[in-house]
Image (spheres, rainbow, N blue to C red):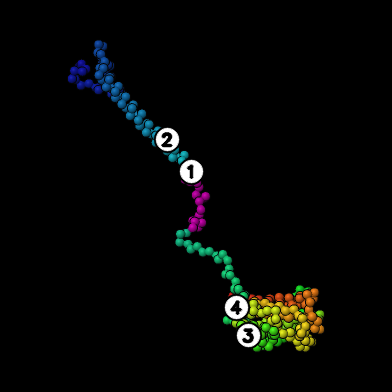
C-alpha cells in the first residue's frame, strides 16, 4: 500500500507521541510532505502564542495581587493577621442603646444675702437691738467696746435731730434702733433706720447732709455727750437699712481732726453695723437654700 493514494494511513500529530511522521515511510525515494510540515509548524506557533498570552494574564494577576497586599500593608498594621486578643472585648465596646449621663459641671449659684435684706418681703427674721448688736461688749481688732444702753422705737423722728427727722419721714422710715458703746472716755451711738425697700434707704442716705444727726443715746454709766459739743458723725446704707453714727468725748470736749481715737471708734461701729446687717442676710439665705 502506497501512502497518499487513498488507502488508510495514520495522521501525523506533532503533539501526539509515537505518531507516524510523513517522511518515515519505508519508501526510500519518498520526499517530505512540505504542505503538512508547514501546517504543523503553523499549529505549533499558534499554540505557543496562546501559552504566552495565558502566561501573561497569570503574571498580571499575580502582580495585581501583590500590589493589593502591599497597599493593605502600607495603610497600617495588617488587620487581617492581628490576633483576636488585641481586639476589644464585647463588654468594652460602646452600646448603641446605652444612655450617656453627665455629672453637673458646677453647683447652683448660691443665694445672694443682699437679696434678703433689701426688701421687707424677704427680710422676715426677728429684729431688735440685742439681735443686731448681741452681747455686752464688742471687739474690733485690738479695741474692746462696752455696750452701755439701747433703744428701739417705731417713731423714727424721736431718735434723730437736725435735718434727719425730715429725711426719715420723707422716705417712710418704719423703725429706729439705737445702741451706745463706750471705751476710754469716748462714746459712740449707732442708729439704724429701717425701711421697706432698699431704694428708700438709699434715698435717705443721699438726702442726709452735714446737719443730719442721730441723737446720742445716754443712760446708765454714760452721761450726756455730743449735746452742744462738736462730735464726729457718719452716714451710710446697706440693703433696706440706713445707719448713722455719732461719736465724741463723754466729758463734753469738742472733737478735732487730731482726735484719732474718736474717729476709730466711729469707724469700728459703722463697720460692725455693716457686718451685722450682711450676716443677717447670710443667715436667711442659708436657711432658704436648705429648705
Residue at label 2?
63
Q: Is residue 62 left or right of residue 11?
A: right
| Nearest to N terminus: mark 2 or mark 3 | 2
Please tell me which residue is depicted at 34% across the width and 26% down the height of the picture. Answer: 48
Residue 75 image label = 1
Q: Position of residue 278 (x, y in %)?
A: 65, 76
Disc 2 from disc 3: Cα separation = 105 Å
Number of residues whose C-alpha sits closer than 10 Å to that of mark 2, classed few (under 14), some (14–19) or many (20 or more): few
Residue 214 lies in what quarter of the image? bottom right
Q: Position of residue 228 (x, y in %)?
A: 76, 85
Please tell me which residue is depicted at 40% across the width and 33% down the height of the picture. Answer: 59
Q: Is residue 244 left or right of residue 119?
A: right
| Nearest to N terminus: mark 4 or mark 1 | 1
Please tell me which residue is depicted at 68% across the width and 79% down the height of the picture. Answer: 209
Residue at label 3?
169
Residue at label 4?
199
Disc 4 from disc 1: Cα separation = 73 Å
* Tag nearer the camera, 4 or 2: 4
Indicate yes or no whether the magenta region holds residue 266. no
| Quadrant for the C terminus in the image | bottom right
| Quadrant for the N terminus in the image | top left
* Tag nearer the camera, 4 or 3: 3
Span colored in magenta: 72-94
| Nearest to N terminus: mark 4 or mark 3 | 3
Number of residues whose C-alpha sits closer than 10 Å to that of mark 1, classed few (under 14), some (14–19) or many (20 or more): few
Say above or below: 233 vs 3: below
Please tell me which residue is depicted at 56% across the width and 64% down the height of the picture. Answer: 105
| Nearest to N terminus: mark 4 or mark 2 | 2
Amino acid at each position: 500500500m502506497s501512502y497518499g493514494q487513498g488507502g488508510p494511513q495514520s495522521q501525523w500529530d506533532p503533539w501526539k507521541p509515537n505518531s507516524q511522521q510523513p517522511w518515515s515511510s519505508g519508501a526510500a525515494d519518498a520526499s517530505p510532505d512540505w504542505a503538512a510540515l508547514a501546517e504543523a509548524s503553523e499549529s505549533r506557533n499558534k499554540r505557543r502564542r496562546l501559552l504566552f498570552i495565558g502566561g501573561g494574564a497569570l503574571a498580571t494577576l499575580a502582580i495585581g495581587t501583590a500590589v493589593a497586599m502591599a497597599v493593605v500593608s502600607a495603610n497600617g498594621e495588617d488587620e487581617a493577621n492581628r490576633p483576636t486578643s488585641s481586639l476589644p472585648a464585647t463588654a468594652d465596646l460602646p452600646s448603641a442603646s446605652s444612655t450617656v449621663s453627665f455629672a453637673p459641671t458646677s453647683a447652683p449659684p448660691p443665694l445672694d444675702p443682699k437679696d434678703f435684706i433689701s426688701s421687707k418681703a424677704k427680710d422676715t427674721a426677728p429684729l431688735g437691738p440685742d439681735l443686731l448688736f448681741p452681747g455686752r461688749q464688742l471687739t474690733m481688732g485690738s479695741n474692746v467696746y462696752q455696750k452701755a444702753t439701747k433703744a428701739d422705737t417705731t417713731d423714727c423722728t424721736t431718735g434723730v435731730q437736725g435735718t434727719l427727722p425730715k429725711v426719715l419721714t420723707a422716705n417712710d422710715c418704719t423703725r429706729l434702733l439705737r445702741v451706745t458703746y463706750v471705751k476710754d472716755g469716748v462714746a459712740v451711738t449707732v442708729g439704724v433706720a429701717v425701711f421697706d425697700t432698699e431704694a428708700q434707704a438709699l434715698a435717705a442716705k443721699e438726702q442726709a447732709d452735714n446737719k443730719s444727726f442721730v441723737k446720742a443715746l445716754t443712760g446708765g454709766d454714760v452721761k450726756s455727750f455730743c449735746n452742744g459739743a462738736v462730735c464726729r458723725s457718719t452716714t451710710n446704707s446697706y440693703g433696706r437699712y440706713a445707719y448713722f453714727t455719732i461719736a465724741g468725748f463723754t466729758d463734753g470736749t469738742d472733737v478735732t481732726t487730731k482726735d484719732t481715737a474718736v474717729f476709730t471708734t466711729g469707724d469700728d461701729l459703722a463697720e460692725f453695723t455693716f457686718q451685722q446687717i450682711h450676716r443677717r442676710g447670710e443667715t436667711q439665705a442659708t436657711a432658704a437654700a436648705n429648705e
